[in-house]
Image (cartoon, rainbow, N blue to C red):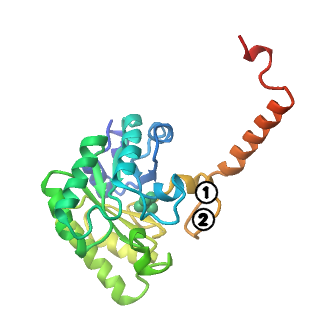
Amino acid sequence: MPVHKSVKKITTHVLNEMKLKGEKIAMLTAYDYSMARILDEAEIDVILVGDSASNVMAGFDTTLPITLDNMIYHAASVVRAVKRALVVVDLPFGTYQGNSKEALASSIRIMKETGASAVKLEGGQQIEESIERILSAGIPVMGHLGLTPQSIHKFGTYVVRAKEEEEARQLMDDAKLLERAGCFAVVLEKIPAKLAEEVTNSIRIPTIGIGAGPKTDGQVLVLHDMLGITQEFSPRFLRRYHNLYSEIKGAVQTYISDVRTFKFPNEKEQY
Ligand code: KIV
């Protein structure tokens, strides 16, 4: 029986076993109770309460403005819905970089106030101390390398990262460092498929790709993108599994028309 079918609850150890057995890990983002419930009942392995909430829930251009309090609100809503999936929460920009004590305090707030199972941080060597301090408190950490959206003002654009040899070598070193430090998995965002494959084969912890080709141990997408709720974001790696934007808009237009033409409510829809 596949590992993910043989367990009632996905843990970081289950993800490791899945990698060992060559079973792919499916991860999606969620930010609220109702969506998280659907994802969990569909048997998604990992739910990421991503700081992409800053874009898709709050309408900001970047992930930078979202606060720790905002993330805690989203994560607690998600956790209330979830029975099976592993829930991982992004530490937002400004709550861990450059200060490992603050990184630990932010992670403790997330764990205490949401009931989530792990945190995710962006970066490699520059946040090593923060990762070690969080891990020393028994909090599992997921890494994130490649295109790290919290550093968008340093990169200047959202183009593919690590195409050049030097950046690719640095990314490989960072992946090994995250493994050594004790991270249980690492997200690889928007890097060449070949490099993602090499990283995946070079570390024992699972890699979860987004725009990183088919050879990572798992895949992640932003829920609102893969459901076609967001319209303007269309990178090559994004597969839209639905066009919910049109479906919802159509339903709302039908409702408006029914209200205006006295079709809603009908005789059965009243007391
Ligand atoms: O915030 C997020 O949604 C993420 C994923 C894109 C990996 O970090």
Q: Which residue is mark 1?
A: 230
Q: Residue furthest left?
A: 136
Q: Is residue 216 left or right of residue 240?
A: left
**Spatial separation of the CA atoms under disc 2 and disc 1:** 7 Å
Q: Residue at x 45, y 47 (%)?
A: 31
Q: Nearer the viewer, residue 66 or 213?
A: 66
Q: Position of residue 189 (x, y in %)?
A: 42, 69
Say if 211 sits above or below 42 in the image.
below
Q: Which mark is residue 78?
A: none
Tag 2 near tag 1, CB within 8 Å: yes
Residue 203 shows in the view: yes
**Tag 1, which secondary structure?**
loop
**Tag 2, which secondary structure?**
loop
Q: Is residue 26 left or right of residue 225?
A: left
Identify the image quadrant of the C terminus.
Answer: top right
Callout 2 crowding tier (Cα within 10 Å): few <14, some 14–19, many ≥20? few
Q: Which residue is mark 2?
A: 233
Q: Amino acid at mark 1?
A: Thr
Q: Residue furthest right?
A: 261
Residue 140 shows in the view: no
